Image (cartoon, rainbow, N blue to C red):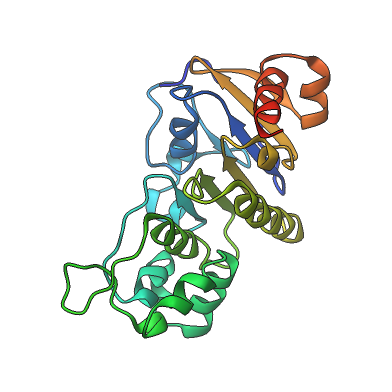
């Protein structure tokens, strides 16, 4: 649940959403993805109410990955290709998505590459680790080339901080190179969050701070406190 949230998310920017568990981060991104409908208030896309846009039409403009991803026990290529059904069997598109997600190492270990059956419940199916499933889910989220909105809700929680940071550096650069794409990032790792153009801090289902990393650190509020605690822990 969110309470009295007013935000302006600039087109063509990378926006990070941070806060403690239960602050409403996932609720916010799912509202923006039209997975939830607001019980009050409205969401506008370039001045048009999101409520007037069909879910199918809006989701056709989205891409990304969530922390509660599904493990599709299919051929590896289909597990990725489901992210953009019209191109599910497009080999170059699938391979490009795998590369974007940094999942090349996962595919390289599969005995038949992208043609490997995933999932131990199938005859000859291969089980992979949670982190490997997560990378395949990331690849699925990156198969769509030019989404209007890219949502990344802690999709790399099973990966180490260095790998996550390198991946998001790549995504942030791609976001700035694309015409007008909005990238929304949810992460508990502040070394990743600090690269965002805008950081939104949620606490108790409310927005408490909004600004750049530098501005929020100078303010000395909740974000600065959380960042300092985490930075100290890594020393």
- Residue 23 vertical position relative to residue 17 in the rendered view, above or below: above
Depth check, front residue: 75 or 44: 75
Instruction: Please provide percent x and percent y for residue 161.
Output: 61, 46
* Image quadrant where one finds the N terminus: top left
- Residue 2 vertical position relative to residue 140 in the rendered view, above or below: above
Residue at horizontal 66%, vertical 50%?
165
- Asked if residue 6 can be seen in this view, the reply is no
* Quarter of the rendering containing residue 125: bottom left
- Asked if residue 28 can be seen in this view, the reply is yes
* Quarter of the rendering containing residue 203: top right
Residue at horizontal 39%, vertical 49%?
55
Depth check, front residue: 93 or 234: 234
Instruction: Please provide percent x and percent y for residue 45.
Output: 58, 41
- Residue 64 vertical position relative to residue 120 in the rendered view, above or below: above
- Residue 126 vertical position relative to residue 137 in the rendered view, above or below: below
Viewed as shown, does residue 141 lie left or right of 120? right
* Image quadrant where one finds the C terminus: top right
Depth check, front residue: 128 or 214: 128
Residue at horizontal 66%, vertical 16%?
222
Query: Furthest residue to the front?
Result: 235
């Amino acid at each position: 649940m969110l309470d009295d949230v007013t935000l302006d998310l600039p087109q063509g920017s990378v926006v990070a959403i941070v806060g403690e568990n239960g602050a409403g981060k996932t609720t916010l991104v799912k509202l923006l993805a039209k997975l939830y409908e607001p019980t009050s208030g409205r969401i506008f896309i370039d001045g048009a109410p999101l409520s007037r846009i069909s879910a199918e039409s809006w989701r056709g403009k989205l891409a990304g990955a969530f922390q509660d991803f599904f493990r599709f026990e299919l051929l590896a290529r289909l597990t990725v290709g489901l992210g953009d059904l019209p191109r599910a069997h497009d080999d170059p598109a699938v391979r490009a998505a795998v590369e974007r997600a940094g999942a090349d190492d996962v595919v390289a270990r599969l005995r038949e590459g992208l043609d490997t059956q995933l999932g131990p419940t199938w005859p000859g199916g291969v089980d992979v680790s949670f982190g490997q499933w997560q990378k395949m889910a990331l690849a699925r989220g990156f198969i769509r080339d030019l989404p209007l909105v890219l949502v990344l809700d802690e999709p790399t929680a099973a990966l180490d901080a260095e790998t996550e940071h390198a991946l998001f550096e790549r995504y942030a650069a791609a976001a700035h190179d694309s015409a007008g794409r909005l990238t929304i990032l949810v992460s508990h790792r502040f070394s990743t969050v600090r690269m965002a153009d805008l950081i939104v801090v949620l606490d108790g289902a409310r927005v408490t701070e909004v600004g750049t990393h530098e501005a929020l650190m100078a303010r000395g509020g909740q974000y600065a406190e959380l960042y300092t605690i985490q930075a100290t822990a890594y020393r």
